[in-house]
Image: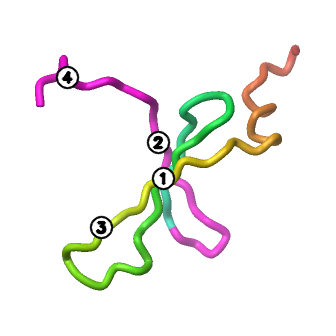
Amino acid sequence: MADSDKVRIGGLWREESKTGGAYLSGKLSATSKLLVLPNGFKKTDKDPDYIVYLAPVREREQTSDKPSFL
């Protein structure tokens, strides 16, 4: 795939869940985010290694991006 065929939609950060599991998370917009989680139900090599979810940004997460002077 040539670089001109790619469209950057955001970045992902490695996070750790409350149970210690690793996942990737990143905002797509002010109201939506991507979550990439390991597939805990993988049984064969044909099953995906990771599952991608589109999730709403929680109210707390929406306000955390605002500068402190606003």
Residue 45 picture location, percent across and down: 19, 77
Residue 66: say if magenta: no
Q: Which residue is mark 1?
A: 24
Q: Which mark is nearer the camera, 3 or 1?
A: 3
Report the residue at 87% width, 14% height from top.
Answer: 69
What secondary structure prevails in the magenta region?
Answer: loop
> Within the image, what quadrant is residue 48 found in?
bottom left
Alpha-carbon span between mark 2 and mark 3: 19 Å
Q: Which residue is mark 3?
A: 48
Disc 2 versus disc 1: distance between alpha carbons?
6 Å
48 vs 68, left or right, is left
Q: CA distance from mark 3 to mark 1?
A: 15 Å
Graded by Cα atoms within 10 Å as few (under 14), some (14 to 19) or many (20 or more), the crowding at tag 2 reads some
Which badge, 2 or 3, is on the more N-terminal residue?
2
User: Nearer the viewer's eye, disc 1 or disc 4?
Assistant: 4
Q: Residue at x 31, y 67 (%)?
A: 49
Q: Are marks 2 and 1 in contact (CB under 8 Å)?
A: yes
State yes or no: discs 3 and 4 in contact (Cβ < 8 Å).
no
- Could you tell me residue 65's position as x and y percent? 73, 28
Q: Quadrant of residue 33?
A: top right
